[in-house]
Amino acid sequence: MRPRRRAANAVGRRQLEGIFREHGLGSFSDLLLNVTRDPAMLLWLSGSDNSKASPNENFAREMFELFVLGHGNYTEADVRQNARALTGFRNDWKRGAGDVNFRYDPTRHDPGVKTVFHKRGAFTWKDAVHLSVTHPDHPSFFVRKLWSYFIPTPPDAPTISPAASPTSMAISTSGFPTITTTRNMACRSASRSIL
């Protein structure tokens, strides 16, 4: 990684924070789509260094491990193939301004067939996001991760099962119901432990 890319500047961090503020209570899929193409994230996770000529696995791995699935819920082959799906982003370097003109360039994208989570297709970066958030292990990971920000102890199985159900996750596309559901689950869990 080039030294100029080791740390994003304050402007990039503010822009990324703006994405979280704008999409934080909305659809997680929309949030992840916006984060995936954000300049600061592309720099931090080498996304703009990821091309069909030289796939870079950093962003693909972090997407799976930190954002959507957690460690152990994907294979190394999934990471390599997802990295290919995420190819195509780039930017320019301008003396005195640094990294500028972030964009998706289809000529840098790997258009070939990829296999991610046993599904085959000529996946793009948007497909990579969709495949990740529709993975069967995403709902329970998402609920546990959200839970951990509000409650210091992990949820028990009876608490997490209803929130990680397909119905609950379908409702969560609006985001706010997910947070409300997590709060309600915490209240029910607390009342069970008191009784």
Image (cartoon, helix red, strand yellow):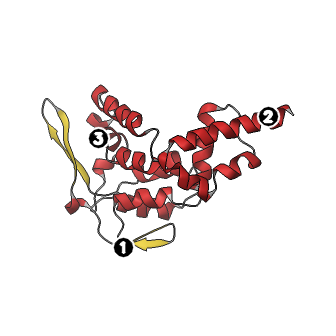
Residue at 31 percent across and 54 percent down: it is 50
Q: Earlier in the sequence, mark 3 or mark 1?
A: 3
Looking at the picture, tell me which residue is in the foreground, 143 or 169: 169
Residue 192 % position (x, y): 82, 37
Q: Nearer the viewer, residue 106 or 6?
A: 106
Q: Quadrant of the C terminus?
A: top right
Q: Amino acid at mark 3?
A: Pro
Q: Is residue 98 left or right of residue 111?
A: left
Q: For the residue labelled by badge 2, is the local secondary structure a helix, a strand or a loop?
A: helix
Q: Are marks 3 and 2 in contact (CB under 8 Å)?
A: no
SS of the residue under disc 1: loop
Tell me the quadrant of the picture where the N terminus can be found. Answer: top left
137 w.r.t. 110: above or below: above
Tell me which amino acid carries mark 2: Ser
Residue tagged by mark 3? 39
Mark 1 in CB contact with mark 2 (< 8 angstroms): no
Q: Residues within 10 Å of mark 1 (few under 14, many from 20)?
A: some
Residue 85 coordinates in the image, percent (x, y): 36, 62
- Residue closest to the eye, 41 or 185: 185
In the rendered structure, which amino acid carries the disc numbered 1?
Val
**Closer-to-camera residue (184/59):** 184
In this picture, residue 125 sits left or right of residue 130: left
Q: Is residue 97 above or below residue 39?
A: above
Q: Which residue is mark 1?
A: 113
Q: Tag 2 or tag 3, which sits nearer the N-term?
A: 3
The numbered mark at residue 191 is 2
Q: Nearer the viewer, mark 3 or mark 2?
A: 2
